[in-house]
Amino acid sequence: MEAYRHILLIKPSSLGDIVHAMPTCAAIRRAYPKAQLTWLVKREWAGIVERIDGVDRVWQVESTLTGWLSQVSLLRAEQFDLVVDLQGLFRSAAIGSLSGAPLRVGFANGREGSPWFYSRRVPVPQLEMHAVDRYLLVAEAVGAAKASEPEFHFRIPKTDHDDVDRLLSRCGVAPGMGWVAMNVSARWQTKRWPAESFAEVADRLQQEESRTVVMVGGPDERADVAAVIAMMKIPAVDLTGATTVGLLPALLSKASMLITNDSGPMHIAAAVGTPVVALFGPTSAVRTGPYGVGHTVLSGKVPCSPCFSRACHNTVPLECLRLVSPQQVLAAVRAQQSQKAVSR
């Protein structure tokens, strides 16, 4: 087996996709423990990659074409001997080729002509497989052993836990106190469960079960969270925009559960072992659901789902999500609580 010494892994975005790539990173690290493994990522997500175990160096790029092109000469100077492109788009494949690495590996069905840039193309046997398992095909193609169980390992520094504990304490959530995280936004409008449904679930958790609900999300999701809180009888703790993306693993590891749309935080919660109740509409849980056991996915059964569309064309707008009732979500939450109590 070739002993690669300098490996470039290209997975620039987005948050959930980066988490999906973690087991591939771990498998390559296991196969080549002496290699330097560099992960190329967009600057906005660098904080997450910095906390992924097995990554030696985080190579940040700006999102613009100019930002990518400015890195070409610097990447060539590194003399990578293996490039693994998990993004599968023209820009990621081209930058891998321009790096000058002799072996460039990516998916045979990559988009935007990306396979033309690869020196080794990895076939994908079926579309209906989880992204985690699909990415692992590339790890196997470069000599990594097939993992019995995909590994998600964050190296979370103590300072992250301390920062999160201080933040929660300031909001009245003491260390060791059980709380439920709620992520009410998503990048696509079509992925968002109705605000009024989130509000009802949050209220009932706080009223009937004395469970503190903590809203999580990025700065650009404040309006979505505010809309939910405005409908609530008992305001939730609002941490929207209060943490960096790098603090999410520490934050979500402390939650007893996450109730969420299909989103990046959903995958981080699953990766750190926090149970998830996820609402799915236009996307496929088979391909991108919360990975592993102990999670629940709820979705309304309509013929057009999954449509993978950012615009709903159904006669009943967002029917796939609206068919999921707050009562179903609460039942899933209680079932997970019971399961957790039994497993202990």
Image: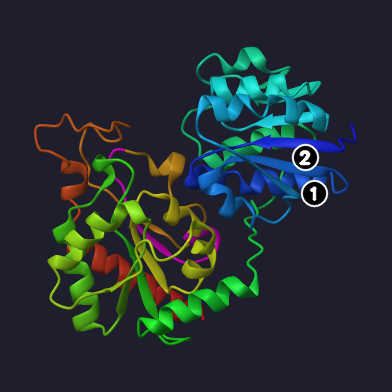
Residue 297 seen in the current view: no
Q: Kindly identify the amino acid type of the residue bearing the numbered disc 2.
A: Ala
Residue at the left extreme of this rendering:
315
Q: Is residue 151 above or below residue 39?
A: below
Q: Is residue 302 left or right of residue 46?
A: left
Q: Is residue 116 above or below residue 341?
A: above
Q: Is residue 46 above or below residue 6?
A: below
Q: Name the residue tied to disc 1.
A: 30
Total marks shown come to 2
Which quadrant of the view contains residue 217? bottom left
- Location of the N terminus (image quadrant): top right
**Residue drawn at 66 percent across, 15 percent down:** 117
User: Quick one: 27 or 177, which is closer to the camera?
Assistant: 177
Q: CA distance from mark 1 to mark 2?
A: 7 Å
**Residue drawn at 9 percent across, 32 percent down:** 315
Q: Which span of residues is magenta-colored?
A: 269-282
User: Quick one: 277 or 154, which is closer to the camera?
Assistant: 154
**Residue drawn at 50 percent across, 36 percent down:** 129
Would residue 162 be counted in the magenta stretch?
Answer: no
Give whichever of discs 1 and 2 has the lower sequence position: 1
Q: Which mark is residue 144?
A: 2
Q: Is residue 244 left or right of residue 328?
A: right
Which quadrant of the view contains residue 221? bottom left
Q: Is residue 27 above or below residue 163?
A: above
Q: How many C-alpha atoms fall within 10 Å of the one at disc 2: few (<14), some, or many (≥20)? A: many
Q: Kindly identify the amino acid type of the residue bearing the numbered disc 1.
A: Arg
x then y, percent, for residue 109: 55, 20
Q: Are marks 1 and 2 in contact (CB under 8 Å)?
A: yes
Q: How many C-alpha atoms fall within 10 Å of the one at disc 1: few (<14), some, or many (≥20)? A: some
x then y, percent, for residue 115: 61, 16
Q: Which mark is residue 256?
A: none
**Residue drawn at 40 percent across, 66 percent down:** 242
